[in-house]
Amino acid sequence: QLQLVESGGGLVQPGGSLRVSCAASGSDLDYYAIAWFRQAPGKEREGVSCISYPGTHTKYDNSVKGRFTISRDNIGHTVYLQMNSLKPEDTGVYYCAATRNPYAGPCSIAIGTGRYIFWGQGTQITVSS
């Protein structure tokens, strides 16, 4: 059974950078697309970015384009989200999630589809001065 563990969250000042990781255990990430979602206090969960297997396709929400970069280490079975130029509105709990991607097609960050079946517990990111 695939398990996902996020790490790397914390407190950062506006304009700062942070990298969060999503590590797999119990199984590898071969043929899985991985997405990052976030949920701010009082708001619904929203899609941030995703990466297909083995990394051919990526997608970003408009709010993070040009600031966030998703990548994956297929040997180390870890997915990363590099976040630069962070803003207070980036504050929230960040979750990684996995969906089967056997044909390595494009991934999706649409929420509420039930597509992503494995989820991590989340890591808190707070952007504040």
Image (cartoon, rainbow, N blue to C red):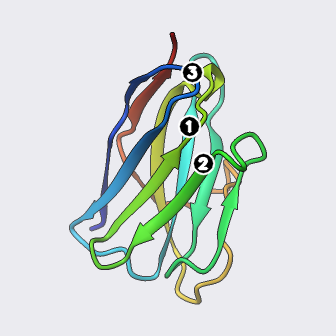
Identify residue for label 1: 38
- Which of the two residues, 42 or 81, is positioned nearer the viewer here? 81
Q: Residue at 60% x, 80% y: name it.
A: 56
Q: Quadrant of the N terminus?
A: bottom left
Is label 1 in a helix, a strand or a loop?
Answer: strand
Give coordinates of residue 77: x percent, y percent: 31, 70
* Mark 2 neighbour density, 10 Å: few (under 14) some (14–19) many (20 or more): many
Tell me the amino acid under the disc marked 2. Phe
Is 123 drawn above or below residue 10 in the view shown? below
Q: Residue at 69% x, 43% y: name it.
A: 64
Distance between the alpha carbons at the discs numbered 1 and 3? 18 Å
* Mark 3 neighbour density, 10 Å: few (under 14) some (14–19) many (20 or more): some
* Mark 1 neighbour density, 10 Å: few (under 14) some (14–19) many (20 or more): many
Earlier sequence position, callout 2 versus callout 3: 3
Give coordinates of residue 13: x percent, y percent: 49, 19
Is label 2 in a helix, a strand or a loop?
Answer: strand
The numbered disc on residue 46 is none
Is 95 drawn above or below residue 89 in the view shown? below
Residue 44 image-quadrant placement: top right
Identify residue for label 3: 14
Earlier sequence position, callout 1 versus callout 2: 1
Distance between the alpha carbons at the discs numbered 1 and 2? 13 Å
Tell me the amino acid under the disc marked 3. Pro
Identify residue for label 2: 68
